[in-house]
Image: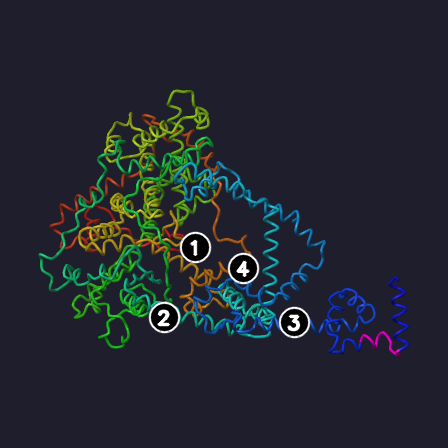
Amino acid sequence: MNTLQNLDEAMEWLWFRDMTPASFMADLLQSDKYTSAVGDLFRDNAGHLLQGLNTYAGREMSVAAHELVNKTYTREILALSNVQAGLQFRASSASAEQVAAFNIADMETKIRQRAPGLWSLMDNLLSADPRVLERRSKGGKASVQRMRKFMRSQKALEVDSEDLISAAAGSELEGADSDDEYWREAALLMEAPTSEELHLERSKKLLGMKKIVLLSMLVQSTNHKCNALQSLVGLFLQSSGTPETVVELLARLGILVTTTSINNMVNSLSSESSVEMKRLGLHNTLIHLTSGTMIPLEHGVTSRMLACSEFLWKKHKRNPKVLSRDLPPPVDYTLLLDLYPEDEDDVSGLTRRERFNTWVFLRDLITHGPEYFRQFRRTLGQPETILQIPITKSKQVPCRMMDINPSTTANNTSVLEDLFRQGGVGDSSESGQSGVRDIGDQVVLVHGDLLTGERIQSLQDTRSEEATPWRRFQFVVYVMGLFHLKMVCADALWRIHIQALQARGQHAVKKTSPNSLMSYVSVIRPRETGKMESKPGFRRVHETIEHVGAVMRLDCWRLAAVQSGRGVKTLEDFADLRPQWKELEVMAARMVQDHVATFDTLTGLRDQSNAIRDQERENTLLRHQHFLLYEEMSYAMNEGDIGRVEDAFMPWVFIFKGCGKHKYAAHMMKHLHNLHFVYPEGLRRAIQTNIMCNLTGTKGRFRAIDWWVEHNNLYLKRVYGGQFSNHTKARILGESPLIELYKNTHIQVENIFHLDHRTTRHSAPDMGTTFQMLGTYMAKNQTNKLVPGRKSPYSIPDANAQGMHMALTSVQQAHEVEDPEDPDNVENEGRNLGVEEDGDVEQEVDDDGGLDM
């Protein structure tokens, strides 16, 4: 019997019983006796039943389905808004820890778990058109081209490129521990995904980000406490100086919290930073204070190592009760010359400084010379380390900015007192200082520029008669800021090589020297010669020293190759000969001895007759010497080799004396003298290992403490300080403790919204063509070649020799001077020797980090 016959018989039976199929189904569904049969009906025929409902009761089924879906999604939204979901965030009482703990991946996981239906719905709504989705998955032409351009810029597949070497080796110009490790890392980089794969991955991440934003808006509309993402975006816009109208518009749209909530969050975070400052002040290792930020001492420094305030006071010359036998010995520059003795066992026969200069010559050939020499970058290695600061990522707690102009000693006193108050450090016996930690016998390291040091010294001198250590400020130990020192080094070279009118072809000089520094500047910076002669700024001078110095050393390589007698005319010809590493090392060492001035060689050259002298080459030898000294100071500061920094102090002391910067020279000698002959071992170690910081915790990324403060000032004034009507003193003062939090917030938001195409870092300029132009100019004018009888309209003064003469003379006259370290006596020393003291003792840092010369 077939199915149709069965249906006919069943229908006849129902009619015989006065039942319709509809009434039979209704009675069956309402019966409690036949629930098993009803279950089988829906389980086995669900598709047919739904199709029938859609055909004969479509409207009613849609309404029911809509109500069911509404209930499901409402339950999911309520589940997300519940406190157990972990999406609630109180902006008005937010802490920096809560802001830093926000994680978009965790938020996605919570949403997926508690609202899978909504997550799937957003997938469908954001990708409703399958054709558009397919086109996106394959990647648009423009997007793929941009991605390919990005990959080419990263040079991810160039095994010979410097970026690949650095990435595979783990550090620049250092290399891995073995060739196997290097090639393994290089192979991993060569398996980088294609541009299409990267575009697809990026599209998926952007889609996920949009779903999270939309669902966050829905949850926040249900429960205003669920505003973690909105609060983070609000903090980001606040730090970016977004106009209030834009903020209010986005708040109305549900993308961020209200302006009031943002302001309450900023106030809460600012109050918390004050608590953090005081917590640091109560920490066992204490802190050292700079003119704007507090930085915990690292590298094993303990409070016991800093417990030496009374020890130093007993030796202080301004102590009314000091005994003559307790006074430290006077500064003797001869002792400072040999703080780090030479290695007598070195087989090269070169001094430590000559070995570093040899490394610089080789580095420039490998970096800027023909492509053949790139293969030696891993062989080059690094110069020897004298005293390395351990690599640790530094942390800071920015202080609240003070509306005080520290231009006088009295105002500097107010600044120090305010900083100590923010840090919770003081003397509980003083009125108004309850609840502070007593400074006791501890010292506090205060970093700053030269003027800060002079005013601290003046403050301590005028208060030496006070009864308590707190009132005498005897616990303050000034530490010289190395960033300002580096700027003064650049300024000294500018004064020696450019400032003099004769050096620029002026002041009754008929013909400019073709080998003057300004002649080189006119080649590489033809539009900036006026600025270089007047107010060049630190960055411009710094780059000029680096670029001109590198090309001068490349010209030395060319000249040495030409003089080798193998038919070589250019560095490219020399590279075609495929010289090996040992030969290059020998040539570099020889060039250092032949082309870098020393006290003995230059004196001998200038004592020759005019028929033999080459005055142009004498200037070039001095320029090599000065530029290499600057290279050594820059390298040592970047690498955190504080031993090499201190070893370079005395050559710069002599140069400063020779060009009229006597105060800086005196303070540099005093700094070395105190470190090695006055301070106890623990304090010396604390200063040496904490005089620089490392913001990233990576090799070659050390910065001076005063650089960090200037960096904070730049961000406060130009990045986070608001714009137009929002750029007010009150806003800058109120948000100054939040610099570090704002930076981290920017990083978080950029990662969340995939703003990876934006960066504040500048790529290294391609100087190949510029260097080639300058190299051709130098070869034409025989910059490094000896030409007997060649004259120059201007002879660069040997500031090093002049400074050594002044230092020797000052030692001979020391018995006539009550205190040779006193700034007034330093000025008298310069006048007695016929040298005027530099009027601009301290250089100012512009908002763009430049130096006002």
Reading the chain from its start, which is encountered first: label 3 or label 4? 3
Q: Measured from the top left, where is residue 240 in percent x and y?
A: 50, 63
Q: CA distance from mark 1 to mark 2?
A: 31 Å
Image mark for residue 848: 1
Reading the chain from its start, which is encountered first: label 1 or label 4? 4
Pick the residue in front: 12 or 434. Answer: 12
Image mark for residue 72: 3
Disc 3 residue type (three-letter) = Thr
Reading the chain from its start, which is encountered first: label 2 or label 3? 3
Disc 4 residue type (three-letter) = Ile
Residue at x 69% of width, y 51% of height: 135
Q: CA distance from mark 2 to mark 3?
A: 46 Å
Per the image, label 4 sits on a secondary structure element best described as helix
Q: Is residue 578 above or below residue 716?
A: above
Looking at the rendered image, the disc whose residue lies closer to the viewer, 1 or 2, is: 2
Find residue 227 and report its image quarter: bottom right
Per the image, label 1 sits on a secondary structure element best described as loop
Pick the residue in front: 738 or 334. Answer: 738
Residue at x 40% of width, y 66% of height: 737
Asked if the residue under mark 1 is in contact with the one under mark 3, i.e. CB atoms within 8 Å, the reply is no
Reading the chain from its start, which is encountered first: label 3 or label 1? 3
Per the image, label 3 sits on a secondary structure element best described as helix
Q: Is residue 501 above or below residue 485?
A: above
Residue occupied by mark 4: 752
Residue 335 falls inside the magenta stretch: no
Looking at the rendered image, the disc whose residue lies closer to the viewer, 1 or 4, is: 4
Reading the chain from its start, which is encountered first: label 4 or label 2? 2
